[in-house]
Image: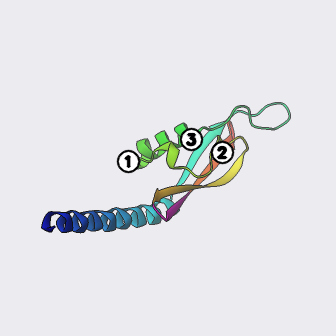
């Protein structure tokens, strides 16, 4: 019985730590805007798309934040220029948001 109680306490403490870490990461993500460049077709529409894998890699390379692409609530690649906000489930009930800006290649 004591072992079970200890395991339950350890699980509760781990859950609280993970939730706290997720809340801190959520705050950090609000200040980040990932920048991407993409080519445009003749009609001014974006040629290709920016995948969640590219977003995941950019977060890791620039900010040392490792978030699995499967945690993104907004599934699918981004295929239009401008700003987008993607929701990420960081932990049970903790939803973070990241800003992504896609500009045409050649624009400053």
Q: Nearer the viewer, residue 67 or 103?
A: 67
Q: Which residue is mark 3?
A: 52
For residue 64, side relative to residue 51 (left or right): left
Residue visible at 44% across and 48% down in the picture: 67
Q: Which residue is mark 1?
A: 64
Rendered image: mark on residue 2: none
* Mark in the foreground, 3 or 2: 3
Q: Position of residue 3 (x, y in %)?
A: 14, 63
Residue visible at 16% across and 67% down in the picture: 1
- Give the SS element for disc 3: helix
Residue visible at 27% across and 63% down in the picture: 11
Q: Earlier in the sequence, mark 1 or mark 2?
A: 1
| Name of the residue lying farthest toward the right | 43
Q: Nearer the viewer, residue 11 or 93?
A: 11
Q: Which residue is mark 2?
A: 102
Residue visible at 40% across and 62% down in the picture: 22
- Give the SS element for disc 2: strand
* Mark in the foreground, 3 or 1: 3
Specify whether residue 9 is painted magenta. no
Q: Position of residue 30 (x, y in %)?
A: 52, 63
Q: Position of residue 39 (x, y in %)?
A: 70, 33
Give the CA separation, mark 3 to mark 1.
Answer: 16 Å
Give the CA separation, mark 1 to mark 2.
Answer: 21 Å
Q: Earlier in the sequence, mark 3 or mark 1?
A: 3
Give the CA separation, mark 3 to mark 2.
Answer: 13 Å
- Give the SS element for disc 1: loop
For residue 2, side relative to residue 67 (left or right): left
Report the magenta residues as a range: 92-97
The 10 Å Cα crowd at callout 2, few under 14, some 14 to 19, many 20 or more, is: many
Say if 107 sits above or below 92 in the image: above
Residue 108 shows up from this direction: no
Contact, CB < 8 Å: mark 3 with mark 2?
Answer: no
């Amino acid at each position: 019985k004591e072992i079970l109680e200890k395991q339950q306490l350890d699980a509760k403490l781990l859950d609280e730590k993970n939730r706290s870490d997720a809340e801190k990461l959520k705050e950090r993500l609000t200040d980040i805007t990932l920048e991407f460049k993409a080519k445009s077709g003749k009609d001014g529409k974006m040629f290709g798309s920016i995948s969640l894998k590219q977003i995941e890699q950019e977060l890791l390379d620039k900010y040392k934040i490792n978030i699995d692409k499967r945690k993104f609530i907004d599934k699918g690649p981004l295929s239009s220029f401008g700003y987008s906000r993607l929701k990420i489930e960081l932990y049970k009930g903790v939803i973070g948001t990241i800003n992504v800006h896609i500009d045409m290649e050649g624009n400053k």
